[in-house]
Amino acid sequence: MNSPMMNPESAIPTRAPSATTVDDTVLPFEVAKLDLRGRVVRLGPVVDEILEKHAYPKPVAKLLGEALVLTVMLGSALKIEGRFILQTQGDGPVRMLVVDFMTPNKVRACARFDKDSVAEAIASGNTDGGALLGKGHLAMTIDQGPDMSRYQGLVALDGGTLEDAAHEYFLRSEQIPTRVRLAVAEELRAAAGGASHRWRAGGIMLQFLPKSPDRARVADLDPGDAPEGMELPTAEEDDAWVEGRALVETVEDVELIDPEVSSERLVYRLFHEPGVRVFNATDVRAECSCSREAVESMLKSFSQDDRDHMVEDGRISVTCEFCSANYQFAPADVGANES
Ligand SMILES: [Zn+2]
């Protein structure tokens, strides 16, 4: 760490921001003057390892990378122990995305998609997130273990991107004005024997969290009960939020991905005028939580009929959809009959 310096104006210890980014980290920050809080996520090896292993078509990989950034952004903010699961289900070429974050810092992800429709989407150049997801829903689940109640938030996917869905969720379910930017790209580097590809991803989230309840009021959005054509009252947005939102909307994809732009430099670039304070960054790891024991007890929970049907060539073989680990069992070990 660089030597701490005192900022005479605020008497808050400050230090020079690191020049280059620290990959696989989450950096929380605060813009006290504007009642804004946020987080910057930078993923290098974590996103590369997960996406490379799956070897999905590129647009599917990119979309899953976005979901990964969003999940890390939200999961790392939880004050509880447990899992945070983000899952999409839609009628687009990408049927399902699942990202599973386990506190404090483990993440895994996978996708299900229709090969032919994805190939068609690529051929027609229609591969933005909204087109791939189609219509459906995004579910966010907090699971604190078998003895605790699960929390689930749902938001409709209506041809928009994951960013759109996140904004909608926070506005309707949490009533917190929120802006999220997500970016995923492949970095190409000259290497012996041709260019090497590496996935990189990043994101920033900004939320307006004023201390005064009066300013925290957001427009009452519940068009569900309003008669059609009725003009809904729109609350005026707070100036501090308007300013913060406008700043975060200037963030370019490259700034979220570029290894030469550190998270600290990014938030400083955005908020140096009102002043920004960063907190300790936390790290993220790509790690699956599957195990032979867990697969075994899952198999034992299946019906006799289902277990019997899983026997192939005298064995039951289960491959983890997240990490591709393969587990093999003799039928008798899990109470199955060989046909
Ligand atoms: Zn696994």
Image (tube, grey):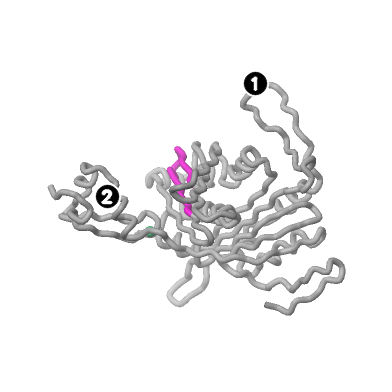
**Image vertical order of residue 327 relative to residue 195, above or below:** above
Near mark 2 (Cα within 10 A), the count class, few <14, some 14-19 or many ≥20, is some
Which residue is disc 1 drawn over? 228
Given this view, does label 1 or label 2 mark the residue nearer the observer? Answer: 2
Which residue is disc 2 drawn over? 300
90 drawn magenta: yes
The stretch of residues the image draws in magenta is: 87-100
In primary-sequence order, the first of circles 1 and 2 is 1
Residue sitting farthest toward the right: 9
Please report the residue visible at 47 percent of the width from the left and 63 percent of the height from the top. 286
The location of residue 154, given as percent across then percent down, is 54, 39
Quadrant of res 155: top right
Three-letter amino acid code at the position of disc 2:
Lys
Disc 2 element: helix
Residue sitting farthest toward the left: 339
**Side of 13 relative to 286 (left or right):** right
Q: In the depicted view, which residue is nearer to us: 293 or 87?
A: 293
Please report the residue visible at 17 percent of the width from the left and 54 percent of the height from the top. 332
The location of residue 15, given as percent across then percent down, is 74, 73
Three-letter amino acid code at the position of disc 1:
Glu
Q: In the depicted view, which residue is nearer to us: 111 or 169?
A: 169
Q: Magenta-highlighted stretch: main secondary structure?
A: strand
